[in-house]
Amino acid sequence: MTNINDITKRRQLAEKYLNAETTVEEEHMLHDFYSQAEAPLTLEDKDMQLLMDATDRLKDNFILSDEKAEEFDRLMDGKPERHGKTISLYWFIPAAAAAVIAFFLLTTSQEQQMIEQNPVAMAVPEDITPQKEEPQRVSEDTDNASHADAISKPRKTAHRHKRKEANAGIHVAEMTEAANYQNEQVESYQLRPAGDVMIVTKMPKDGLSSSYIIYANDEGHSYRVMPINM
Amino acid sequence: MESQDFQNIATSVRPKLMNLCRSFFDKQELAYDAEDAVQETLLRLWQMQDRLSDYQKPEALAMLIAKNVCIDILKLNKEQHEPLDETSNIIGNVQADQSMITHDTEQIISNALAKLPRTQQRMLMMRAEGMSMVEIATTCNATPTSTKTMICAARKKMMEILKIGRNKK
């Protein structure tokens, strides 16, 4: 066994180490000496100490992970990532249901009140009112008054809209019942998530179905309804 | 696991690992050498020799490790290609400055390691883990003589870079 405390022997061993002629045991001995060395070291020893330190840093403690293997299989199968869409739909479905019911209840009741109290023009923003189901009522002689209404009414709608959003988890049957209560003879609603939006198809009893796209604004703080295939 | 057992496993599983890694890099359009991934896999298999008894089939374990290695490389590749924004550049510079001031030695070592080719780095690591020359040769698909030559060259080069770094300090 080499006496590593002897400087001559240590230099010989270091030379062997650099030539890759040392055994694993001799290398361990060198490593232990330099990692624990307290006595003042020569410049050559300091270089060896640095080299030992450097090779130490190469050691890599890896953790075997089943998740990584699953990710590998998923990538090889070309399947999409599992997260993301599922999570977005999780919040979107009840929120969209709430938005739909709020939309149909409010537009129907507001229009009825409008007609009763102030039978003048009402310009409702097209993102809230479907044009085919709820045709715009325009009166030629009351343009100014109707403009004021157009500004104030959607604001009220937005407030009430938000209150309804809190009521998450509403079923389609309840929506249908609510719409029928407002004299809209709706037979059923169909909700279809498509990516980050929801397509709602209203099926009235007269057979003329209509569809809307609902999507979230401001990270879900408000919702926008767009009529399609009108 | 005996040294001969490891060599047998490494020799028999190497072609399968190579196919697996190659197909992964092709599929992900990664310009990465499958040989490196196989070497890394076999090194990790060797590191796990104490736990090998927990696994019924070492080959299946090798494939599992290879999948881990491939995902690690993929993630590393993504990180390297992500554009740095201004903030992270500033943070990076500050961190580098602090590192230069407080950890000169670490910086010298990191620079020296970075200048070695990947295979030489891995061979040094294998040796530091206690693998014999024959085991390293099997893992790297090389002869023991060329393995010894490469380790020798890597150590001498490292020593040279470390000396230059120390003198600059």
Image (cartoon, helix red, strand yellow):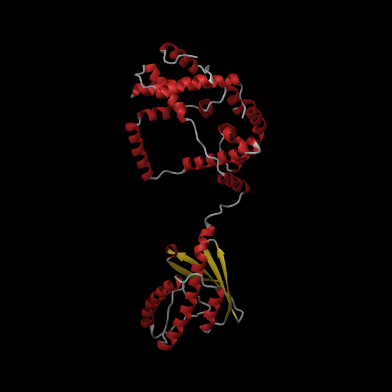
Coordinates of residue A78 in the picture (x, y in percent): 61, 49
Tell me if A54 is positioned left or right of A184 in this view.
left
Horizontal arrangement in the rendering, residue B74 relative to residue A76 (left or right): left
Residue A230 shows in the view: no
Residue drawn where x is 62% and y is 36% of the image: B53
Does residue A74 appear in this view?
yes
Residue closest to the far top: A8
Q: Which quarter of the image is occupied by the C terminus of chain B?
A: top left
Q: Quadrant of residue A4?
A: top left
| A27 relative to B91, above or below | above
Residue A198: x and y in percent read: 53, 66
Q: Nearer the viewer, residue A39 or B87?
A: A39
Residue closest to the eye, B165 or B6: B6
Kindly identify the residue that appears in the image at 42 percent across and 22 percent down.
A34
- Of the pair B127 and B55, the residue shown nearer to us: B55
Which one is in front, B135 or A38? A38
Q: How many numbered circles does the render carry?
A: 0
Residue A36, picture quadrant: top left
**Left or right of A44 in this view: A86:** right
For the N terminus of chain B, the quadrant is top right
